[in-house]
């Protein structure tokens, strides 16, 4: 059944688990996410970005998700719009049936320029009023998402969500979930050295949770950049520089301090790219013309990855 983000995260908080929120762009991805959820009995969050809309079209994304609701009626599914740049875009998503939207007012509409706190409060509050009237949840974001690598002192501090601001933001906007900056960044290139010790600033997260015990936190940029898939990609013709992501065990630590929604896009891209490269390079597949076999290899790889995240974050068994 389609559920709102709020319903699902309230339940997750009650039971102390986190849920991966997977970005989607195509059918194989959606099926991998659902087959894994079905196998381990996990609720599901699927989210569409602006890039996904450009790739598949909003209508196809929406119907792919609605197909899962029909096919898996026993699994709670959240249909979420990731990083909407304006209240207008949020309104469109609500209108078309999304059960949750992210108003990213941490940036101006160009999605590049950092926005003022007042602008962020203003646009987010507008969206909350509109969304809540329709039973739709809202995720807001404050802070500047970015890897803290090679940054120290003041610079570091500016990249972390300020607890004082977070409290004020939640009070003024009444968002259902808050994306916080605690050291992650989007994409595959988060850290250039293997993580030794903590890459997340868990101390900041703890502080945020003490101040906002009833707020659900969202962690963007939560791909772990699996080293085995990186190796597979490069073994079969890829040329991806050495890079590292957020270790799964640190995400699990974050879940102890209020992280409920864990955004993952890059990891599924890596698993599918690796699986496809490997399948095509395999000489025993040289005479294969049924391209479904290629997609199947990607779907299997993504399914395994999804299932391991459901299990690690504790959502398995909670559908
Ligand atoms: O916010 C992040 C997602 O990874 C979006 O990526 O715009 O390339 O679909 P995309
Ligand atoms: P990754 O690039 O780490 O997968 O993060 C995705 C994300 O945060 C989407 O909003
Ligand atoms: Na931001
Ligand atoms: Zn994001």
Image (cartoon, helix red, strand yellow):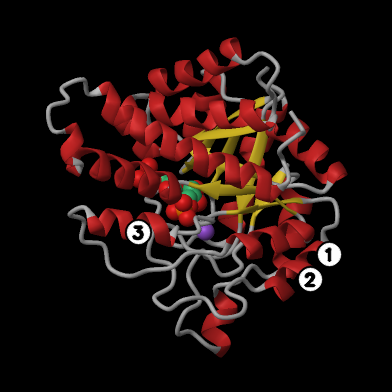
Q: CA distance from mark 3 to mark 1?
A: 39 Å
Q: How many residues crowd mark 3 within 10 Å: few (<14), some (14–19), many (20+)?
A: many
Q: How many residues crowd mark 1 within 10 Å: few (<14), some (14–19), many (20+)?
A: some
From the viewer's side, name the closer residue of 62 and 120. Answer: 62
Q: Are marks 1 and 2 in contact (CB under 8 Å)?
A: yes
Q: Is residue 115 above or below residue 138?
A: below
Q: Which residue is outermost to the top?
A: 70
**Which disc is residue 230 wearing?**
3
Q: Position of 172 compared to 295: left or right?
A: right
Tell which circle, 3 or 1, labels the residue nearer the N-terminal end.
1
**Which disc is residue 211 wearing?**
1
Q: Which residue is outermost to the bottom?
A: 153
Tell which circle, 2 or 3, labels the residue nearer the N-terminal end.
2
From the viewer's side, name the closer residue of 221 and 237. Answer: 237
Whether residue 33 can be seen here? yes
Q: Residue at x 55, y 48 (%)?
A: 263
Residue 295, given in percent of the width and then of the height, sits at 31, 29
**Which disc is residue 207 wearing?**
2
Q: Residue at x 24, y 58 (%)?
A: 235
Mark 3 or 1, which is nearer the eye? 3
From the viewer's side, name the closer residue of 251 and 311. Answer: 311
Circle 3 — which element?
A: helix
Please identify the quadrant where the N terminus is shown.
top right
């Amino acid at each position: 059944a389609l559920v709102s983000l709020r319903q699902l995260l309230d339940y997750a908080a009650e039971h102390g688990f986190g849920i991966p929120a997977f970005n989607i762009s195509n059918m194989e991805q959606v099926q991998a996410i659902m087959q894994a959820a079905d196998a381990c009995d996990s609720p599901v969050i699927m989210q569409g970005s602006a890039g996904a809309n450009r790739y598949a079209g909003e209508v196809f994304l929406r119907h792919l998700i609605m197909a899962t609701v029909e096919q898996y009626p026993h699994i709670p599914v959240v249909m979420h719009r990731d990083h909407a740049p304006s209240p207008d875009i949020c309104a469109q998503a609500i209108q078309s049936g999304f059960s949750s939207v992210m108003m990213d007012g941490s940036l101006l509409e160009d999605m590049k320029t950092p926005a003022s706190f007042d602008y962020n409060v203003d646009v987010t509050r507008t969206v909350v009023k509109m969304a809540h009237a329709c039973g739709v949840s809202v995720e807001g974001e404050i802070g500047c998402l970015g890897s803290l690598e090679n940054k120290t002192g003041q610079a570091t501090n500016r990249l972390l969500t300020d607890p004082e601001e977070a409290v004020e933001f939640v009070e003024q906007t009444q968002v259902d979930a808050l994306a916080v900056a605690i050291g992650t960044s989007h994409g595959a290139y988060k850290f250039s050295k293997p993580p030794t010790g903590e890459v997340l600033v868990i101390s900041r997260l703890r502080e945020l949770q003490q101040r906002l015990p009833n707020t659900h936190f969202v962690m963007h940029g939560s791909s772990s950049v699996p080293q085995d898939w990186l190796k597979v990609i490069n073994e079969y013709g890829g040329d991806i520089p050495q890079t590292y992501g957020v270790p799964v065990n640190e995400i699990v630590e974050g879940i102890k301090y209020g992280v409920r929604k864990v955004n993952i896009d890059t990891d599924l891209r890596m698993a599918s790219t690796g699986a496809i490269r490997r399948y095509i390079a395999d000489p025993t597949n040289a005479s294969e013309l049924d391209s479904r076999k290629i997609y199947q290899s990607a779907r299997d790889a993504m399914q395994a990855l999804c299932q391991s995240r459901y299990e690690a974050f504790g959502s398995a068994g909670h559908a």
